[in-house]
């Protein structure tokens, strides 16, 4: 189908449709546009539009003609019998008519068809196309129905094929709008959490949104960069490295004078299309004196220390750590030496003075 092949009326409807498609942002607007021009162009009685939602799960946002609202509300019942989706997904971008999808006998025995009759909206004829844009991860679809036994013609198929690419572009805009709303809702929720410093950015480092506390945190920890917008170079480079597949999703910096620690956590957000988006959390903490006191201990010695604080015996510590009792005795001796204490009572008293919680009185044992 070419422009020259169309009648004057068809050209008028197609022209108005394409003009309106350039303006839509939401699925509901797209449905109104399609109902006003595309339904008339195809002589359809009702229609449905869908687009995959942002996120890892293949869930869909649906908009339909009012006539089909009850039918799609019961989609879980007929979903396993959906011959339309099964057909169009094999060749995205190509328009299919019902006789290319299913025989008349098969249609009349199909759960979708039977339910449509039960609900008083007999879907006798169908024409559909899966809408995608090359290189994008989302997908959607447009389906036109007739409630009378009048098959869609090759001409109808050609007309829908002619506008399918522009319809896909309009649906893509709606999908991007959905994604922006997702991040807007995320930040609306975050704004209610007082004092949380958080940024959403692209892998390239371009900041999409940020909460108010971010600026103060950045000025405090990166005083030499004097940023008016965006993130410090070191954090942008970290995000770019993660996007390339680097491991480690946290970055830390410590102020030894104040004992403050800044921890920055990068989390990949559900990807819809285009550049990957990241959530960047800033969290300030203060390292305790207890941490300083125990920093010389090995990981196993640290575990043994906290078991000692719970009043565990050497035998119980050995069982918890999977070690021999003699090994635990040596570890406990090392703990005393590194902490400058002479026994469990002194170790517990010193730890308590630095903020540690002792669950129960420690039991002295021969070392």
Image (cartoon, rainbow, N blue to C red):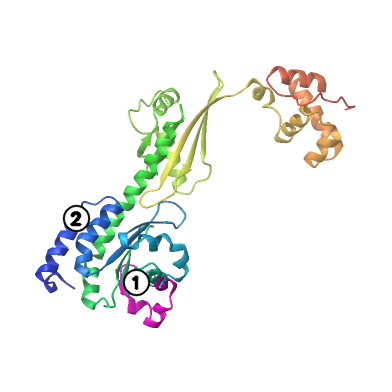
Residue 180: image x %, image y %? 34, 44
What residue is pinned by disc 1? Answer: 122
Disc 2 element: helix
Decide if residue 159 is on the left or right side of residue 62: left
Quarter of the image where the N terminus is located: bottom left
Question: Quick one: which residue is furthest to the right in this view?
Answer: 366
Earlier in the chain: of badge 2 and badge 1, it is: 2
**Is label 2 in contact with label 1 (beta carbons under 8 Å)?**
no
Position of 325 with respect to 100 (left or right) is right
User: Where, by quadrant of the figure, is residue 66 drawn?
Assistant: bottom left
Residue at left offset 36%, top offset 36%: 209
Mark 1: give few (<14), some (14-19) or many (20+) Cα within 10 Å. some
> Label 2 to label 1, Cα distance in Å?
30 Å
Provide the secondary structure element on which disc 1 rests.
loop
- Total number of numbered discs in the rendering: 2
Of badges 2 and 1, nearer the viewer stands 1
Q: Which mark is residue 322?
A: none
Answer above or below: position of 301 versus 158. above
Q: Locate residue 129, reporting x and y percent.
A: 32, 68
Q: Nearer the viewer, residue 63 or 289?
A: 63
Q: Residue shown at 40%/48% (left/top)?
A: 276
Vertical order, 5 against 188 (above or below): below
| Residue 13 in which image quadrant | bottom left
Check if residue 105 falls in the magenta segment. Answer: yes
Which region is colored magenta? 90-114
Q: Nearer the viewer, residue 336 or 270?
A: 270
Q: Which residue is mark 2?
A: 20
Give yes or no for residue 125 being in the magenta stretch: no
Which quadrant, please, contains the C terminus? top right
> Which residue: 33% across, 50% down?
176
x, y percent for residue 275: 37, 48
Q: Quick one: 325 or 58, which is closer to the camera?
A: 58
């Amino acid at each position: 189908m070419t422009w020259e092949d169309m009648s004057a009326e068809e050209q008028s409807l197609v022209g108005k449709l394409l003009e309106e498609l350039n303006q839509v942002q939401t699925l509901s607007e797209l449905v109104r546009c399609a109902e006003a021009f595309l339904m008339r162009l195809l002589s359809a009685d009702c229609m449905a539009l869908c687009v995959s939602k942002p996120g890892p799960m293949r869930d869909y946002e649906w908009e339909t003609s009012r006539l089909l609202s009850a039918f799609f509300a019961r989609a879980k019942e007929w979903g396993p019998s959906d011959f339309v989706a099964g057909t169009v997904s094999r060749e995205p971008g190509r328009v299919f008519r019902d006789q290319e999808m299913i025989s008349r006998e098969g249609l009349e025995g199909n759960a979708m068809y039977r339910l449509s009759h039960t609900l008083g909206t007999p879907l006798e004829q169908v024409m559909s196309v899966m809408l995608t844009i090359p290189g994008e991860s989302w997908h959607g679809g447009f389906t036109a129905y007739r409630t009378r036994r009048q098959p869609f013609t090759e001409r109808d198929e050609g007309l829908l094929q002619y506008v399918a690419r522009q319809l896909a572009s309009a649906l893509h805009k709606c999908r991007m709008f959905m994604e922006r709303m997702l991040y807007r809702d995320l930040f609306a929720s975050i704004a209610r959490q007082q004092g949380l410093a958080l940024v959403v950015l692209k892998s390239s480092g371009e900041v999409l949104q940020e909460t108010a506390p971010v600026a103060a945190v950045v000025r405090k920890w990166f005083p030499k960069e004097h940023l008016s917008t965006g993130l410090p170079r070191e954090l942008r480079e970290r995000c770019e490295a993660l996007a390339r597949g680097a491991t480690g999703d946290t970055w830390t910096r410590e102020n030894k004078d104040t004992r403050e620690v800044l921890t920055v956590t990068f989390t990949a957000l559900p990807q819809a299309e285009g550049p990957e988006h990241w959530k960047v959390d800033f969290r300030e903490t203060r390292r305790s004196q207890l941490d300083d006191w125990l920093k010389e201990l090995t990981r196993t010695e640290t575990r043994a220390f906290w078991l000692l604080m719970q009043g565990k015996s050497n035998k119980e510590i050995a069982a918890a750590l999977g070690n021999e009792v003699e090994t635990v005795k040596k570890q406990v001796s090392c703990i005393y030496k590194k902490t400058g204490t002479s026994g469990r009572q002194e170790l517990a008293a010193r730890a308590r003075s630095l903020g540690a919680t002792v669950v129960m009185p420690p039991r002295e044992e021969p070392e």
